[in-house]
Image: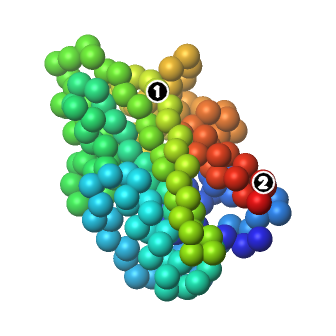
Amino acid sequence: MKLVFATHNQNKLKEVRALMPKHIEVVSLTDINWHAEIDETSDTIEGNALLKAQTVFQKTNMPCFADDSGLLVNALNGAPGVYSARYGGEQKNDHDNIHRLLHELQHTTQRDAHFKTVMALVLNNKSYVFEGIVNGQITTEKIGTNGFGYDPVFLPQGSLKTFAEMSAEEKNAMSHRAIALKKMTDFLSAM
């Protein structure tokens, strides 16, 4: 089976390909020569994942899935949430996003947060949604150099390492994306 993953993000693509069963070939938007931007206009993580997957399916008629993820911080009333990728500005820069987050949390000890990923799958003109959540804490500084996004400041519950201190294998064993993807691959295997 071939599935289009509605992303140009090579980090996400690499992560997903490592977790996908071998009988499922994952191709990116770049692989199918899709260069149009898909505006994420929903105010929810679920809505943006569905929007991306449905848009690609409607234009290509190829089975497609998309994800949207967000970091939700309790002390910030769930921010950055759906705006996680552009929290530090429209340039979508990881350093700027983390800088703003740590600045806004500098005067609080309440650092509980969770990562949430929603995978939306469109298959045979039907949409399915799979969710993954990992609870944790925001550190007071960046720790580690692996991963991407908020990984250097996210300490998963029960771990002594931030996501950025983990190997790809360690992160993939517990990440929000891995949880959502496992639910989706289980669904596909049961079909």
SS under mark 1 = strand
Name which residue lies at 55% across and 49% down: 130
Residue 120 drawn at (x, y percent):
52, 59
Q: Which amino acid does label 1 sit on?
A: Asn
User: Circle 2 is placed at which residue position?
Assistant: 190
* Residue nearer the viewer, 167 or 13: 13
Which quadrant, please, contains the C terminus?
Answer: bottom right
Say whether disc 1 or disc 2 marks the residue closer to the N-terminus.
1
Residue 16 drawn at (x, y percent):
64, 54
Q: Residue 118 carries which label?
A: none
Name which residue lies at 21% across and 54% down: 89
Name which residue lies at 31% across and 21% down: 111
Which quadrant, please, contains the N terminus?
Answer: bottom right
User: Circle 1 is placed at which residue position?
Assistant: 135
Height in image: 191 above or below 29? above
Residue 151 drawn at (x, y percent):
46, 37
